[in-house]
Every structure is written in C-alpha cells, then in structure tokens.
Amino acid sequence: MPDDAVASAVRIENRGDVALILIDNPPVNASSQAVRKGLVTAIEAANKDAAVAAIVIACEGRTFVAGADIREFGKPPLPPALPDVLTIVEASGKPVVAAVHGTALGGGFELALACHARVLDPGAIVGLPEVKLGLIPGAGGTQRLPRLIGVRAAIDLAASGRQVKADEALALGIADSLAAGDLRDSAIALARSLVGRPIRRLSELAPSPFDRAEIDAALAGIAQKSRGQASPLVAARTVLLAAELPFAEGMARERAAFIECLQSDQSKAMRYVFMAEREAPRAPQLEGIAPRKVERVGIIGAGTMGAGIAVAFTDGGFSVIVVETSEAAVEAGRKRIAAPWDRQLKSGRLTASQHEARSASVAVGSDFAALAACDLVVEAAFEDMDVKKDIFARLGAIAKPGAVLATNTSYLDVGIIAQASGRPGDVIGLHFFSPANVMRLVEVVEAPASAKDAVATGVAVAKKLGKIAVVCGVCDGFIGNRILAHWRPIVDMMVEDGAAPQGVDGALEEFGFAMGPYAVGDLAGLDIGWARRKRLAPTLNPNVRYASTIADELCALGRFGQKTGAGWYSYSGGKKALDPLVSGLIDKVRAQKHREQRVFSNDTIQRLVRAAIVNEGAKVLSDGIARRALDIDVVLISGYGYPAWRGGPMFEADALGLGRILADIEEAHAFAGAGYEPAPLIVSLARADRRFADLAPGEAAGGQ
Ligand code: 3H9
C-alpha cells in the first residue's frame, strides 16, 4: 500500500491543542486498509505530539465510517486488522472523541465505541448491520456495546441490525451529546473538557446486571424470527459473552465467531445480495442514458395501490397530484393517503410540521386535465385492459411533451397500453408492490417502443423514492408475478394430492419465506387471483393440470382471505386458525378428482418449489425479460420474501450446482406435468458445467 494512499485516506489538522483526525475515503469512508493504517499512524503521531492534549476523529464527505470495506471480505486479510486498530485507538493516553455524522455503521460504529466519548450530529444514525450481511460485529461491537448500554439493549441492536437515530442513541447512552451547532466544534470542545480527567475505556467497564430469564426469552425470540438465518443468534450469544468473560477473552471469541460467519455460505449469499441490489438499477442497456427531469408527479387512482404510490412519491419529496373519478372517490382517496402519515404523527415518527408539509404536497381532485402539468404520470386504475387503454388515450392527448407515462399494471401488456397513448416512446411500466409506500421493489417495465430515457427516468425516480429498481421486459407478470404464477400451482397440486395448506406454509416458512403461500394469499386477497383465473380461463391449455379448484370454491363462498374474515384460514377475532370447512372442502375436491394421495415431506415441498422458481427464472432469462440472473434474485428477495440468506433462487442454484437443481426440476416435471419441462437454458448450462452468473448480460436471451 503506497504511503500517499494512506495519507490521502487519513490526515491530521491541528485545532489548537486538539488533533482533528480526518478520514476521507469516498464514497462511504469504509475502513479499508488505507484507513486502518492511517488511523494507527495518526493516533500514534497525536500521542507523541506534545502540543496535542486531546484528539477528535471525524470524517469528510457524506458520512462517518459506514463499516468495514465489504469488498475486502473474501480476500486474504490485509493488515492491520480493524480490532487491533481499535485497540490502539482505545489505548490512547489522550482522550479521543468521535464526531459522528451520517451513518456510523458496523466497523464505523465500533470505531466510535473505541473512542472515549461520542458527539452525534442530530441527523446521525448508528447501528450494527453486520447480521444483514450474514456476519456479526467483528471489531469489538459485541463486547464494548453491552458495557455501554447493557446486555439486553446491545443484543437488540446486534441481532436485529436496526439503525438507531441520534435521539435514541442519546437516550440509550451511546451518544454523550448531540451537537447543537457545528459537529466538529462540539466534539473539539468535549475533547478539551476531558483533558486531565480519567479516561473512560469501555473495555475496562463491566456490563450492568441484567435479568437472565429476560435474555433467554430474547434469544428464543431471535432464533424464531431469524427463519433459518444463523448470524442473529450468533451475534446475540456473542454479546452475552461480555457478561461472562473478561474483555480480552470475549474479543477472541468474537473474532472466531466473526471469521466463521465470514466464511459461511449464508454470508457469501448476503454479501452478493448487497451488491446485487446496488447493481440491479444499472441496467446495461441504459448505460450513459440521462433520465428526464421529474418534479411534479400525477397519479391516476387513489385506491390501495394509487394511495400507496402517492404516499411514496410525497415522502420522496415530489409534488403530487392524484386524480379520481368522483367526489366520493376523491374523499376516500384523501383519507387513504393521509392514513399512514396520521399513524406516523401519532407514533412520533413525523412531527406536526412534517405532517402538514406532506399533506400540503399532495392534491387530490377529479380534474383529469390537471395531469397536463406533470412530468410523470403513474396510472394505478382498475386492472382491466379496456380501462387502461382508455386512460392512456386520454393521457397521451393531454400530457405535456416529454412527460413519462407509466402504468402500474401487474400483468397486462405494457406495449398494448403504450400504443393506445399514441406516444409509445413515453410509456413504461412502473410496477409497485403493495403497500407501495413500504415495499422496496419497483419493476421498471421496458416495452418494445419505450424510449431509453423514459426507462432511465423510471429507474432514477425509483432510486429517489429509496426503492430498488429492476428493469424488465414485457410478458404476462413481468419477472416476479410470472415466476409466482408458475410455482404457485405446484403447491395447489400438492394440496390436492395429500398435503395440507398449513403444512405447505410451514415447510416454506421453514425454508425461510416470511409467510407461506396460503397465508400470503389470505393477506393479499384471494379474489385477485380468482379474477385472473377467470380472465385466463378461455385460453387455458387443456394439457396443463388445473389445480385451483379448491381456491375457486373458497372464493365462490365469499372467502377472500383476511378482509372477509376467512380464506384458507379463518380469522375470527383477528386470530389465524384452521377451519374444518376448508379441510372438508379439500377432501371433497380430492374425492371428485380421484387424485391418488401421498405424503409430501418438507424437503420435497421446498425442493420442488425452488426448482419451479429456478426453472421459470431460466425461461425469464432466455426470453430476455430479465437481462441478468441477479435481477431475478433481487425481485424474488425484495418483492416476494425469498430468504436473502439463500442469495435468491438463481444464486442458490449456482451455489448448489445446476446439475442438482436440474434433477429437482425433472422431479417437479414428473409431478406437475405439462408446463414444467426443464428450461433448455438450465439443461445447456448444467451440461457445460456453467452457472447463471457466468452469463454476460443478455447472453441467455435468444440463445436457445
Ligand atoms: C463490518 O463493518 C464488519 C465489522 O464489524 C468487523 C470488521 C472486522 N464497503 O448503498 P449506497 C458502497 S460489515 C464497501 O448506494 P446510500 C456501495 O457498494 C459492514 N463499499 O449509498 C456503493 O458503491 P457503488 C457494515 C460500500 O447512500 C456506494 O458505497 N456496514 C460499503 O444509499 C454507495 O452505497 C454496512 O453493512 C462498505 N461497507 O447508503 C453498511 N457500504 O456505487 C453498508 C457502501 O460502487 N452500507 N458501499 O455501488 C450501507 O448500508 C449503505 O451503503 C449506506 C449508504 C447507508 C452507508
């Protein structure tokens, strides 16, 4: 490592008798090797300098150190190791104060904990997000934090990875103070005030006493909530060691556990997901394309989706106009849009003035012509082709030149909708997921005639909303719903052939999905799928097994899921329960269809579902609907609850070996019949011993 790289990453500016150590390692000041080396040099120099009485560590740019450098993981270790660097920081004979702005995460937060006091900018955030990378804090976080805020609170932070805002950090005792004015000035003043007083090193403190039964209950809760992910429980147990072992021994145990996690398949998968989420919006076909400017956004429809989209855009800082068809719908829409902000006001997540500002940024009315002033219009009307064609014909006529016109359809052909507008170059799909103000995924649909800069605008806008954009082509269901529509019937077939819906839910929750498909169906509303099945009924392939009879009969009884108090489960009093009516109905359909009954193990359910997902994923790739396997992984994880610790279906298939997945696909085909034939892409990759990740963007498309 050249000296000038170290010098540019960390420098000292003397402010009177205080040495201000400045870390400057864009974009997020990760603690890369140059930073680690520079910190050691700077701390040693400041300690040797007789003119220096105290030290402040601060960062240039947008944030304090946001963690260890993720790109260094998986490579041979580059000395000095961060824990050793932090030992040197903490051992400083002169008081060291951290001046924290932006996000002090992981190793960055651990650096702040190795300092003798912490001043936070009021907008700062701290946290230990290592578990989200399949890791645990590995630079003293598990041992210093419980000594500062107690074992229970430290377990909560280390096992959840949640971010803590400055106010809470102050209340927990993480921050000594919040900066009232200039952060560095505040930190310098605090550092001066510590001169001549005993230095408070967290490693020398003992954690305060705690209730062991409460901790045991917390550990049990973490194990259950992790759904197969290992690191949260490892993080929690390692924090607990702080109460049982001397600091040095705790540190050694933390290091060993960190390394074990680092080498685990789960961490490799989660680090891939971190990078894939950042790579997804960089669609190769959009390289160098500048998005159009968007300030004012129109939304057509204020139902559940439209209202959620309106909230998302308003929260994202856009000025929003929502158009409905009648005064009654306008009124209902206004209420729907205000509801999440009202809740946030009540819980203190929004101040009264923020609440007022949000409400003032969105206008709900019934004048379609108001959309003429918008730079982007998102249509979220009823999911019906004729309705959408009519809207786009009107929109095409009134929208200003250059405005991007987007449909939020989840299945319909965006190309046909685009043609109806008379200006198909301006039309894209923006497929939000429900609730749109919460879910992070947006599929940006590129129709055949969509202009590249219209698509780039969809991506840029999604980023501004804090969402993950994945660009995809037009087909029935795009990436996510197409894959869902493919694997979902398999579990219905299993239920017809002997599995119980709750058994399937249990198996897939054990696999790591947040909820099983039947519980999800009840939550989302079974009527949506029913309407789609009725729409597609005339085009059904008679050779493909139809396994939705039970669902159809539930819907015919008005059991649409939670919203009607009953679906696959019953929900009297809001509590999910098994319903004998459902098992009776299943028995009836099984008897009518004369299906031979068999037992489905959890393993069989999990393998066949994964095989169906990967198989359709391969077809999505070879049809050019997704250009890269990572797009499919990101969609399945962020939109459909595929466990992130598995890395997504395509990553997992690569990791397990496509030969093994192909065997599962063949088993799924033997079970489910026509429509489940192995994708030619998988067969050819498995034969050539290649992986999805080996494919260059778009290479799979048209290659069959
Ligand atoms: C750790 O600390 C382990 C220790 O306990 C023990 C060690 C021994 N490293 O997200 P963005 C890049 S584990 C390298 O788009 P934002 C990112 O890839 C770590 N690179 O910005 C992207 O690059 P590109 C614990 C990193 O403003 C660019 O920075 N820390 C790292 O939306 C911008 O990122 C974490 O897990 C990194 N650590 O969000 C924090 N972080 O443009 C992870 C970011 O080339 N980071 N990059 O694609 C974050 O949560 C967000 O990046 C942050 C900024 C909130 C900081």
Image: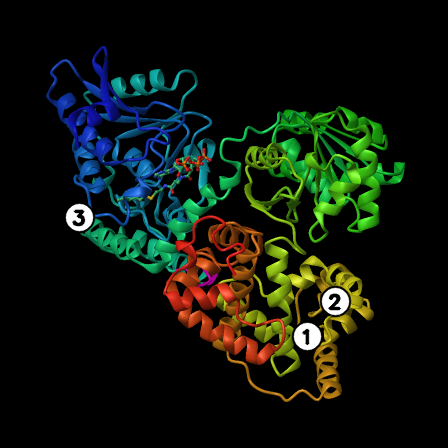
Mark found first going from the N terminus, 2 or 3: 3
Where's residue 367, x and y in %?
85, 30
In this view, the mark in front (3 or 1): 1
Q: Secondary structure at mark 1?
A: loop
- Residue most extreme to the front: 703
Q: What is the magenta range?
A: 224-229
Q: What residue sits right under mark 3 in the picture?
A: 248
Q: What residue sits right under mark 2 in the picture?
A: 566
Does mark 1's beta carbon lie closer than 8 Å to ligand 1?
Answer: no
Does residue 559 appear in this view?
no
271 displayed left or right of 323: left
Q: What residue sits right under mark 1 in the picture?
A: 544
Placement of 146 over or under 232, stated as above or below? above
Q: Nearer the viewer, residue 597 or 359?
A: 597
Q: Residue 646 lies in what quarter of the image?
A: bottom left
Q: For the point 54% across and 31% down, which residue is it?
A: 289
Mark found first going from the N terminus, 2 or 1: 1
Does residue 481 appear in this view?
yes
Placement of 109 over or under 56, stated as above or below? below
Q: For the point 63% across and 75% down, which residue is it?
A: 674
Placement of 299 over or under 155, stated as above or below? above
Q: For the point 75% across and 61% down, which residue is it?
A: 532
Where's residue 419, x and y in %?
76, 41
The residues tagged by marks 2 and 3 sit, at their Cα atoms, a distance apart of 56 Å
Magenta highlight: main SS: loop
Where's residue 397, x and y in %?
82, 31
Q: Secondary structure at mark 3?
A: helix
